[in-house]
Image (cartoon, rainbow, N blue to C red):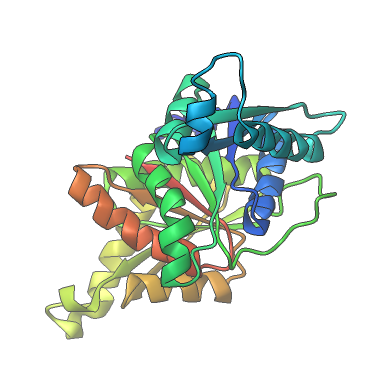
């Protein structure tokens, strides 16, 4: 999708917007529309569902269509129409099956893709019912995923450009984080945005507090080296090193620097490792007052 050693370019041919028809999901749809316009990509509006037992019994006869399917087709068509314009054709696609598997497989079929999903994710109950779908999509897809959480600002449906003036990429120097930096720099270039690169050093890992300045200097050098070559020429990145809890420091940076988009790399080394990584990332997504783009590696 991009080449990190040179000036990176983002290649997106399809924006896959997964909706559950909630208000939060509608806000995600506006971001999806603007991303599709920005990249001159196709926008496909999807909804994944599982047939109820009654609907399944009715559709055992191939000549019959359940009311559940009819209603979902109607809602999906209406959502696609609302996002369409003279410069953007939007295609509805109703997917049958578990949402996280269906959406990820659909994105793979239309690669290179960018997935957009909204999530309520507020309280424990809400997250269990709705937020878990977004989190499962993060775990199961290899494509970049933009998650619009409950704290993300609502943008006008009449907007024609992406409201991204400043991007933050939080990194821990894993391969996924390096990919995320390259993607963030490429996106900053196409959006003419400023970019911050942040590394948070856990306080518990600092064995000699008196050498903190020296340690920070080491991480600043590492951050500069992790940036794609010639990045300074077109994105003017600024690097930051903070000490403390990653969740708290990232949120503080987002608020203090008026960040419009947070980019995170998620390591995909094992099922358990990915689960642990997405759980931490998802908590940030829920609490961050801007959309979060995750890159899996």
Instruction: Say above or below: 131 vs 19.
Output: below
Residue 294's x, y, as percent?
Answer: 44, 48
Residue 171's x, y, as percent?
Answer: 36, 56
Question: How many discs mark residues in the rendered view?
Answer: 0
The furthest residue to the bottom? 210
The furthest residue to the left? 207
The furthest residue to the top? 63
Residue 50 in view of the camera: no
Task: Report the quarter where the C terminus lies.
Answer: top left
Which residue is rendered at x = 56% and y = 76% of the image? 256
Instruction: Say above or below: 183 vs 213.
Output: above
Residue 194's x, y, as percent?
Answer: 61, 55
Give 233 or 297, whichever is nearer the viewer.
297
Residue 25 in view of the camera: yes
Which residue is rendered at x = 13% and y = 81% of the image? 208
Give 27 or 237, whichever is nearer the viewer.
27
Instruction: Say above or below: 284 vs 107.
Output: below
Residue 92's x, y, as percent?
Answer: 67, 29
* 297 displayed left or right of 2: left
Give 109 or 87, whichever is nearer the viewer.
109
* 132 displayed left or right of 253: left
């Amino acid at each position: 999708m991009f080449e990190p050693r040179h000036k990176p370019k983002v290649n997106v041919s399809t924006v896959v917007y997964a909706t559950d028809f909630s208000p939060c999901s509608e806000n995600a749809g506006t971001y999806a529309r603007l991303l599709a316009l920005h990249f001159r990509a196709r926008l496909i509006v999807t909804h994944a569902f599982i047939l109820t037992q009654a609907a399944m019994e009715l559709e055992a006869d191939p000549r019959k269509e359940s009311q559940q399917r009819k209603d979902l087709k109607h809602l999906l068509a209406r959502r696609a129409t609302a996002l369409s314009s003279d410069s953007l054709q939007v295609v509805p696609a109703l997917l049958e099956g578990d949402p996280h598997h269906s959406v990820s497989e659909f994105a793979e079929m239309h690669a290179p893709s960018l997935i957009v999903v909204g999530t309520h994710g507020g309280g424990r109950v809400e997250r269990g019912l709705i937020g878990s779908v977004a989190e499962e999509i993060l775990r199961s897809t290899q494509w970049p995923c933009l998650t619009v959480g409950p704290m993300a600002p609502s943008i006008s449906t009449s907007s024609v450009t992406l409201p991204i003036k400043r991007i933050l990429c939080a990194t821990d120097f894993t391969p996924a984080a390096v990919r995320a930096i390259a993607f963030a720099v490429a996106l900053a270039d196409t959006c003419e945005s400023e970019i911050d690169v942040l590394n948070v050093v856990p306080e518990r890992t600092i064995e000699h507090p008196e050498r903190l300045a020296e340690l920070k200097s080491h991480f600043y050098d590492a951050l500069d080296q992790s940036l794609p070559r010639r990045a300074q020429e077109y994105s003017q990145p600024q690097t930051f090193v903070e000490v403390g809890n990653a969740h708290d420091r990232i949120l503080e940076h987002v608020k203090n620097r008026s960040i419009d988009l947070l980019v995170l790399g998620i390591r995909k080394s094992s099922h358990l490792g990915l689960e642990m990584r997405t759980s931490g990332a998802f908590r940030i997504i829920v609490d961050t007052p801007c959309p979060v783009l995750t890159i899996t590696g």
